[in-house]
Image (cartoon, helix red, strand yellow):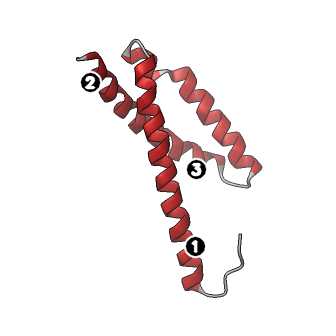
Amino acid sequence: MKACHTLEEVRHEVDAIDAQMVELMALRNNYVKQAAHFKQSVDEIKAPDRMEYVLERVRHHALTLGLNPHMVAQIYSIMINEMVEAEIAQFRNIKGF
């Protein structure tokens, strides 16, 4: 992390990070939709055990970085739920439902 000397510089850096975060979410979403090719049912897509695993993993990672694990888990929960819906749509499109 670089030391910023003005508010504008801080905002520029935050904006750049936001752009990277959105790009990473898009990449994650593309992989999630790709997973639909390997699943046999909508129930398999929902995979509550996998969701809990991911949430626990990101909570732990947040703690190691000094972030609020509850905040990170909430963000991931929203992201996962939306991506599951996208994967279900992809699955139905692939399977012709």
Residue 86 higher or lower than 20, as above or below: above
The N terminus, quarter of image: bottom right
Residue 66, percent from left and from top: 73, 55
For marks 3 and 2, give the one nearer the viewer: 2
Q: Which residue is mark 2?
A: 93
Snapshot quadrant of residue 92: top left
For marks 1 and 2, give the one nearer the viewer: 2
**Mark 3 in CB contact with mark 2 (< 8 angstroms):** no
Snapshot quadrant of residue 11: bottom right
The C terminus, quarter of image: top left
Residue pushed farthest right? 64
Depth check, front residue: 70 or 19:
19
Q: Earlier in the sequence, mark 3 or mark 2?
A: 3
Residue 65 higher or lower than 90, as above or below: below
In the rendered structure, the answer to whether residue 96 lies left or right of residue 28 reads: left
Residue 58, percent from left and from top: 64, 41
Per the rendering, the mark at residue 13 is 1
The residue under the point 44% across, 23% down is: 46
Q: Secondary structure at mark 2?
A: helix
Q: Earlier in the sequence, mark 1 or mark 2?
A: 1
Query: Label 1 amino acid?
Result: Glu
For marks 3 and 1, give the one nearer the viewer: 1
Q: CA distance from mark 3 to mark 2?
A: 33 Å
Residue 86, percent from left and from top: 35, 34
The residue under the point 46% across, 26% down is: 35
Query: Label 3 amino acid?
Result: Met
The residue under the point 48% across, 47% down is: 25
Residue pushed farthest top? 40
